[in-house]
């Protein structure tokens, strides 16, 4: 799969996408485009969970280009990918946030940390490296990172098919007592109805939806736009 280094992981996501129901109403919601000077990469504060393939790939990127990544201003530990649950899960490492790195309205319930692949401006070192070396922006970037704030809810007892959607403060799947949620609390994941910079989510997230279409062979953006015709 030429669009990503993680072909096995993309294949799993592609199967979900081909089977999924698209939540048209969610993508009509207004949100603001990503603005790093405003959000300071709040969505990346706690790192990202990785498939085994992605964990191996991220380690390989660091092994091949550690000095280049450090030149971007990254503070990379010896092990940039940590293992959790006795090796059953993998996640990018985090570091403590430095003064001035977090957004002014950073959610109080988020830990004050940063993914180790973020530079001081909130830019992703993995993405910067891909671009500088002539690959597509998200080629080496884990899929969960660039899909955000889009969520693929898996089939379960309540859903016979996966659902491609955006979560809201009311239905954020990570919401629990004392924790208002994750995606719905990030800047691009928050509903922003009526803001001058806000547009319908399917417009704001065109690049993400097009990439999801490329890896799945399904015209997801076209389906979401169909009711405009």
Image (tube, grey):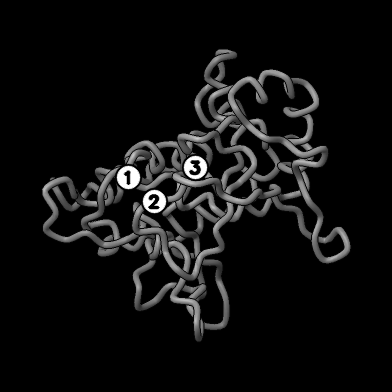
Disc assigned to residue 68: none
The residue at which mark 2 appears reads as 103
Mark 3 and mark 1 residues within 8 Å of each other at the beta carbon: no
Q: In front here: 153 or 86?
A: 86
Of residues 82 and 204, the one drawn nearer to the viewer in this rendering: 82
Location of residue 229 in the rendering, given as x and y in whole percent from the top left corner? 13, 45
From what the image shows, is residue 66 above or below residue 79? above
- Per the rendering, the mark at residue 38 is 1
Q: Position of residue 3 (x, y in %)?
A: 56, 29
- The residue positioned farthest toward the front in the image shown: 99
- Between the C-alphas of marks 2 and 3, the distance is 20 Å
Q: Is residue 33 left or right of residue 138?
A: left
Tell me if label 2 and label 1 are in contact, CB under 8 Å.
Answer: yes
The residue tagged with tag 3: helix, strand or loop? helix
Question: Who comes first in sequence, dot 2 or dot 3?
Answer: 2
Query: In the rendered image, which quarter is residue 80 located in?
Result: top right
For the residue carrying disc 1, how many other residues have a C-alpha within 10 Å: few (<14), some (14-19), or many (20+)? few
Question: Residue under circle 3?
Answer: 146
Q: Is residue 199 above or below residue 86?
A: above
Question: Can residue 21 be seen from the camera position used here?
Answer: no
Helix, strand or loop at mark 1: helix
């Amino acid at each position: 799969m030429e669009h990503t280094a993680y072909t096995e992981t993309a294949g799993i996501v592609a199967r979900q996408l081909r089977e999924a129901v698209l939540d048209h109403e969610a993508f009509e919601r207004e949100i603001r485009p990503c603005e790093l000077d405003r959000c300071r990469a709040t969505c990346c504060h706690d790192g990202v969970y990785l498939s085994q393939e992605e964990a191996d790939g991220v380690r390989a990127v660091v092994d091949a280009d550690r000095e280049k990544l450090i030149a971007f201003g990254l503070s990379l530990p010896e092990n940039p990918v940590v293992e959790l649950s006795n090796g059953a899960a993998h996640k990018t490492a985090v570091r403590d946030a430095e003064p001035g790195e977090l957004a002014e309205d950073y959610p109080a319930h988020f830990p004050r940390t940063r993914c180790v692949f973020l530079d001081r401006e909130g830019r992703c070192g993995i993405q910067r490296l891909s671009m500088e070396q002539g690959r597509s922006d998200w080629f080496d970037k884990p899929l969960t990172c660039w899909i955000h704030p889009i969520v693929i809810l898996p089939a379960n007892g309540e859903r016979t098919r996966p659902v491609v959607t955006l979560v809201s403060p009311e239905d954020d799947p990570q919401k629990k007592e004392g924790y208002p949620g994750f995606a719905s609390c990030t800047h691009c994941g928050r509903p922003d109805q009526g803001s001058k910079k806000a547009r319908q989510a399917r417009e704001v997230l065109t690049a993400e939806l097009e990439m999801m279409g490329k890896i799945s062979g399904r015209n997801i953006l076209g389906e979401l736009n169909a009711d405009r015709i």
